Image: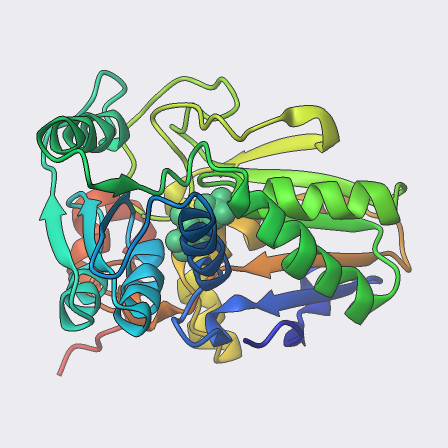
């Protein structure tokens, strides 16, 4: 896996250095490969996982793809429980890699799908006692992998970090990086970035459309002790950032990357000259061609965002 690929986006914070860590370069196409490897290793360590054991997990897409790769390579069967926000590309990747994909189309009390996905897993576990739930929302193996790999790579490669902007889904990446940075670089300001409408940090729930960041149920692994600030970004601003970066910088990033970069840009005025800023890009945009890079999909949800900035040109 590639732990050390960064690009510079200094123009987002004039006077400072901005490093974007490209996790889309991992073989599974996202930051979640490290989580997947760690979750399967923890399952093996539990002594309850044998050749052909079926593993089950709730996923917004990327973890499922990464787990499907790991399980295919190791000889485990896999069920991915996802929802309509997962892109068709992600679902197809999971299937092609041999996973069973279940799409749960029932909204929970917060208008999201997470609790419904977990409830479904609960039912499957009751029916099949040999099924093994990896449970990324509560499993400390996820944050540990990001502490030992992602967090360490950030500091080792960059050397000195004043500000770290990290998106929060299950919060595994955030928790792990925050733990590493707090211990080895205590002065680094750690900014958690989440989507408006996510309940992770106690905000009011609202409908969300972009997979990756945000939850409709607080993850058990979340501990806000190492977090200095939480920033919530609207999905429409994130989409606009992604599309602008694609058109004007030739950078095709996923929606959560756009969200994190909105937070960097919004903070620019408060960041002193000469600072070193780091942000994590969890994946690339090629999984979102039919969603955030599709004019019709965006116009249906946020008509003002596409406006006169259509990607597909009229003939
Ligand atoms: N961005 C994307 C595209 C993701 O798939 C995920 C995983 N849900 C995240 C961000 C958030 O990562 P984490 O679950 O480690 O908080």
Q: In this view, does 223 lie to the left or right of 180?
A: left
Q: Indicate left or right for 30 with 151 as reference.
A: left
Residues 64 and 140: in front is 140
Q: Where is residue 252 in the image (x, y as percent from the top left)?
A: 42, 73
The image quadrant of residue 208 is top left
Q: Which residue is drawn at 74% across and 59% down?
A: 152
- Marks counted in the figure total 0
Q: Quadrant of residue 29?
A: bottom left
- Say above or below: 128 vs 57: above
Answer with left or right where residue 38 lies relative to residue 118. Answer: right
Instruction: Identify the residue at image location x=67%, y=74%.
Output: 4
In the image, 77 versus 244, the foreground residue is 77
- Looking at the image, is 292 positioned above or below residue 46? below
Where residue 284 sits in the image (x, y, percent)?
A: 42, 69
- Residue at the spot 49% in from the left edge and 60% down from the top edge: 282
Residue 274 percent coordinates (x, y)? 91, 60
């Amino acid at each position: 896996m590639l732990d050390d690929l960064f690009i510079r986006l200094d123009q987002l914070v004039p006077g400072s250095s901005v490093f974007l860590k490209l996790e889309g370069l991992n073989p599974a196409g996202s930051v979640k490969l490290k989580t997947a490897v760690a979750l399967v290793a923890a399952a093996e360590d539990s002594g309850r996982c044998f050749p052909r054991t079926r593993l089950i997990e709730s996923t917004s897409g990327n973890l499922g793809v990464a787990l499907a790769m790991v399980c295919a390579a190791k000889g485990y069967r896999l069920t991915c429980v996802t929802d309509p926000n997962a892109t068709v590309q992600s679902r197809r990747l999971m299937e092609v890699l041999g996973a069973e994909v279940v799409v749960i189309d029932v909204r929970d009390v917060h208008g999201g799908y997470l609790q419904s996905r977990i409830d479904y897993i609960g039912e499957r576990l009751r029916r099949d006692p040999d099924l093994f739930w990896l449970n990324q929302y509560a499993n400390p193996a996820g944050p540990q992998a990001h502490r030992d790999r992602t967090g360490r790579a950030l500091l080792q490669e960059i050397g000195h970090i004043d500000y770290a902007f990290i998106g929060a889904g299950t919060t595994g990446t955030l928790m792990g990086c925050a733990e590493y940075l707090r211990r080895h670089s205590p002065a680094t300001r750690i900014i958690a970035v989440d989507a408006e409408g996510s309940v992770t940090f106690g905000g009011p729930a609202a409908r969300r459309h972009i997979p990756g960041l945000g939850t409709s149920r607080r993850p058990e692994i979340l501990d806000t002790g190492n977090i200095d600030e939480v920033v919530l970004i609207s999905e429409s601003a994130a989409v606009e950032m992604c599309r602008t970066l694609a058109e004007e910088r030739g950078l095709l990033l996923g929606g959560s990357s756009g969200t994190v970069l909105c937070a960097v840009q919004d903070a620019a005025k408060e960041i002193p000259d000469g600072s070193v800023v780091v942000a994590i890009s969890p994946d690339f945009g090629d999984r979102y061609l039919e969603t955030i890079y599709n004019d019709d999909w965006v116009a249906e949800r946020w008509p003002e965002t596409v406006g006169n900035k259509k990607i597909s040109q009229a003939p």
